Image (cartoon, grey):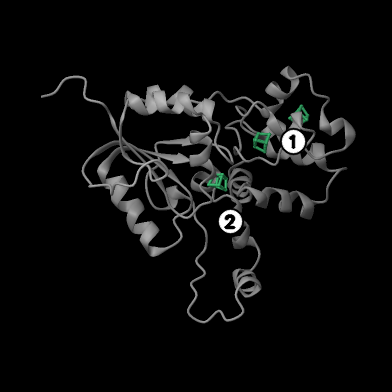
């Protein structure tokens, strides 16, 4: 047996904008250093060769399983890989495409295509509706730095734990004036931090692309925003990044 064999990794995109894969390329040399530590079996943004199949230590899956081909690919990857990781908000939470689920699918498709006969219009579902997901890199897009931080653990076969802290912690550390003081409906307190509060630092509200944190208090968030947005507006914001169904689940349990 060959000692110190490099872990076999694939990065695969289903239906997506590929922005999370580009977040990796944006790491530049740091990403190339990472690639040097693994055997990259598939990553079509940087190589042309067909994936020859075979066992994988880790697969990172971006996007939504929308087409039958996507779903087949996803099942096959799960079978081949010791760990399967969701890469980004679409894969983990349905993402922006999930807005369609809430907007009467038939109307949406008619808006895009004049003649809808023969065009499939499946409900958008995140990966864990189909296969077991071992870990999630959250965000739209993911944070490249966070990828580099947690990959060593994943490559060692361990599942990292992202600290349960709100976006507000990094927002305060950046010295930002809280948007809530200016009556801007920011979801920061209930959303998983780790993005360096990039939106509030640019004076944009957090709309929750990294998902609810484990102890995120939806009831308290609703109450804090009640003089800023109507219930309907609150729901609309939760639809942007596929947060709505997670919030409904959380509220059902509590
Ligand atoms: S999470 Fe965002 S950046 Fe990543 S594939 Fe989906 S839409 Fe694109
Ligand atoms: S602006 Fe948003 S993220 Fe920043 S402290 Fe206020 S609620 Fe939290
Ligand atoms: S501030 Fe909120 S919406 Fe912006 S990147 Fe962070 S989690 Fe996503």
Q: Is residue 29 above or below residue 206?
A: above
Quarter of the figure with residue 232: bottom right
Q: Which residue is mark 2?
A: 98
Q: Count how many numbered circles sit on residues in the image.
A: 2
Secondary structure under tag 1 reads: helix
- At 75% from the left edge and 20% from the top edge, which residue is drawn? 172
Distance between the alpha carbons at the discs numbered 2 and 1: 25 Å
| Residue lying farthest to the left in this orientation | 1
- Whichever of labels 2 and 1 marks the residue nearer the N terminus, that label is 2
Which mark is in front, 2 or 1?
2
69 relative to 108 in the view: left or right: left
C-beta proximity under 8 Å, tags 2 and 1:
no
Quarter of the figure with residue 143: top right
**Residue 155 numbered tag:** none
**Residue 220 numbered tag:** 1
59 relative to 126 in the view: left or right: left
Secondary structure under tag 2 reads: helix
The image shows residue 229 at horizontal and vertical percentages of 83, 47
Q: Is residue 39 above or below residue 73?
A: above
The image shows residue 166 at horizontal and vertical percentages of 66, 27
198 relative to 120 in the view: left or right: right
**Residue 52 or 85: which is nearer the viewer?**
52
**Residue 245 or 40: which is nearer the viewer?**
40
The image shows residue 2 at horizontal and vertical percentages of 13, 23
Q: Is residue 160 visible?
A: no
Instruction: Give the class, few, some or many, for how many residues have Cα within 10 Å of label 2's Cα (few <14, many ≥20).
Output: many
- At 28% from the left edge and 29% from the top edge, which residue is drawn? 7
**Residue 3 or 43: which is nearer the viewer?**
43
């Amino acid at each position: 047996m060959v000692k110190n064999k490099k872990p076999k990794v694939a990065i695969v995109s289903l239906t997506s904008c590929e922005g999370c894969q580009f977040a990796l390329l944006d790491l530049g040399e740091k990403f190339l250093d990472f690639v040097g530590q693994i055997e990259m079996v598939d990553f079509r943004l940087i190589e042309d060769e067909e994936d020859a199949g075979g066992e994988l230590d880790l697969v990172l899956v971006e996007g939504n399983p929308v087409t039958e081909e996507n779903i087949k690919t996803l099942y096959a990857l799960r079978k081949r890989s010791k760990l399967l990781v969701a890469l980004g908000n679409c894969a983990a939470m349905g993402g922006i495409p999930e807005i369609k689920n809430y907007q009467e699918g038939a109307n949406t498709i008619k808006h895009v295509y004049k003649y809808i006969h023969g065009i499939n219009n499946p409900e958008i579902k995140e990966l864990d509706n189909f296969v077991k997901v071992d870990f999630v890199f959250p965000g739209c897009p993911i944070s490249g730095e966070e990828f580099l931080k947690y990959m060593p653990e994943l490559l060692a076969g361990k599942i990292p734990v992202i600290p349960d802290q709100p976006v507000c912690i990094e927002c305060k550390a950046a010295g930002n004036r809280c948007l809530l003081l200016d009556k801007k409906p920011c979801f920061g307190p209930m959303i998983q931090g780790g993005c360096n509060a990039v939106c509030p630092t640019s004076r944009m509200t957090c709309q929750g692309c990294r998902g609810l944190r484990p102890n995120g208090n939806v009831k308290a968030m609703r109450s804090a925003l009640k003089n800023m947005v109507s219930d309907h507006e609150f729901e609309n914001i939760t639809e942007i990044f596929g947060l709505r169904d997670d919030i409904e689940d959380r509220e059902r349990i509590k």
